[in-house]
């Protein structure tokens, strides 16, 4: 379940005389796009309705509704949020993109992406040493050298799968298993281990913990927006560079985010329910549909879950559950 820690952290509406319509933004975008080179043009910062005055970037007109109403996963009604971006009263840079996707960033580049249509959240901490993926197929929590995984059982109620990648290898179990197994360099054996509770939304902890945020940082965040860049590719993809973080969204809604010269990548799609995180510490992906999956890789350790088959791999050995029965491959 996604949680919105900043539900009371509103983006103040600008004064009416400071508002800029999307048609004006489009006209300005067309007049500014005389440069046909590959480099993104610098943008004049204008305002969009519903965001903080003075510190926003033009928006390409897609004939979309001016506001989007979202229902959060807790079935509590959220207020209308305008398409555009600004700074919250908590000092968070917030982008409200089309297809019900929201991107939050802190001054030190912690990132959290919420895909409301698919109930997906991805996040990476400011230091980059912690990451989170919450997906309908399961949740992944990477902290330092460890990765913990919860895979939801959609076919047999009450038999979720659990795994932990750590220095001993990969340990795993399930709700209906009384035994914990470990796949290490010697093969598969029983062991004792504990697993964190990943059933709640821990992405906000990854995002906020040890990051720079708060009301005292609002002006600094506004300053970063003044320096941001925006352009539209020939394919119609919107692109932003904010505080050395590149955000792009294609016409069909796919969002990609790059940080640290591509060392950190986050993505999610509202159309097919896919999501992924790639950092120097972990690579994980999830997708929805009949061929839905959850995949995690750290070094030589792997976990793949298809909804019916749960397999972990380490040091050339594989084991897991198939139709809730233990399998050693």
Image (spheres, grey):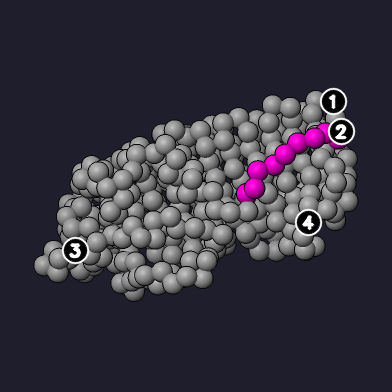
The numbered mark at residue 186 is: 1
| Residue 106 visible in the displayed image | yes
Q: Secondary structure at mark 1?
A: loop
The residue tagged 3 is 14
Asked whether 33 falls inside the magenta stretch, the response is no
Dot 2 surroundings within 10 Å: few (below 14), some, or many (20 or more)?
few
In which quadrant is the N terminus drawn? bottom right
Q: Residue 204, how many percent across, how many down?
A: 47, 49
Queried whether the magenta region covers residue 191, the answer comes back as yes
Q: Main secondary structure of the magenta part?
A: loop
Q: Which residue is mark 4?
A: 159
Q: Answer with mark 4 or mark 2, whichever residue precedes in sequence.
A: 4
- The residue lying at 39 percent from left, 60 percent from top is 7
Spatial CA span between label 3 and label 2: 62 Å
Label 3 Cα neighbours within 10 Å, binned few <14 / some 14-19 / many ≥20: some
Question: Is the C-beta separation of discs 3 and 2 under 8 Å?
Answer: no
Residue at figure coordinates x 73%, y 46% from the top left: 162
């Amino acid at each position: 379940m996604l949680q919105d820690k900043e539900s009371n952290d509103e983006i103040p509406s600008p004064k009416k005389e400071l508002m800029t319509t999307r048609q004006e933004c489009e006209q300005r975008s067309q007049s500014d796009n005389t440069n046909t080179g590959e480099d993104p043009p610098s943008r004049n910062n204008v305002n969009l309705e519903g965001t903080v005055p003075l510190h926003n970037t033009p928006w390409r007109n897609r004939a979309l509704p001016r506001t989007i109403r979202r229902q959060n996963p807790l079935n509590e009604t959220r207020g209308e949020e305008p398409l555009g971006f600004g700074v919250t009263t908590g000092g968070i840079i917030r982008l409200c993109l089309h297809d019900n996707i929201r991107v939050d960033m802190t001054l030190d580049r912690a990132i959290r992406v919420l895909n409301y249509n698919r109930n997906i959240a991805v996040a990476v901490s400011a230091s980059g040493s912690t990451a989170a993926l919450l997906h309908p197929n399961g949740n992944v929590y990477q902290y330092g050298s460890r990765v913990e995984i919860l895979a939801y059982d959609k076919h047999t109620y009450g038999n979720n799968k659990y795994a932990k990648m750590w220095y001993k290898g990969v340990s795993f179990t399930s709700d209906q298993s009384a035994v914990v197994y470990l796949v290490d360099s010697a093969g598969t054996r029983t062991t004792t281990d504990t697993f964190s509770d990943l059933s709640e939304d821990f992405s906000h902890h990854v995002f906020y913990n040890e990051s720079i945020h708060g009301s005292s940082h609002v002006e600094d965040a506004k300053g970063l927006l003044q320096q941001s860049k925006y352009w539209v590719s020939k394919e119609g993809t919107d692109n932003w560079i904010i505080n050395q973080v590149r955000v792009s969204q294609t016409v069909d809604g796919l969002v990609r985010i790059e940080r640290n010269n591509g060392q950190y990548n986050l993505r999610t799609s509202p159309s097919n329910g896919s999501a992924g995180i790639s950092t120097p510490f972990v690579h994980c992906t999830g997708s929805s549909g009949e061929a839905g999956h959850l995949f995690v890789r750290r070094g030589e350790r792997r976990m793949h879950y298809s909804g019916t088959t749960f397999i972990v791999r380490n040091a050339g050995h594989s084991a897991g559950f198939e139709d809730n029965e233990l399998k050693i491959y």
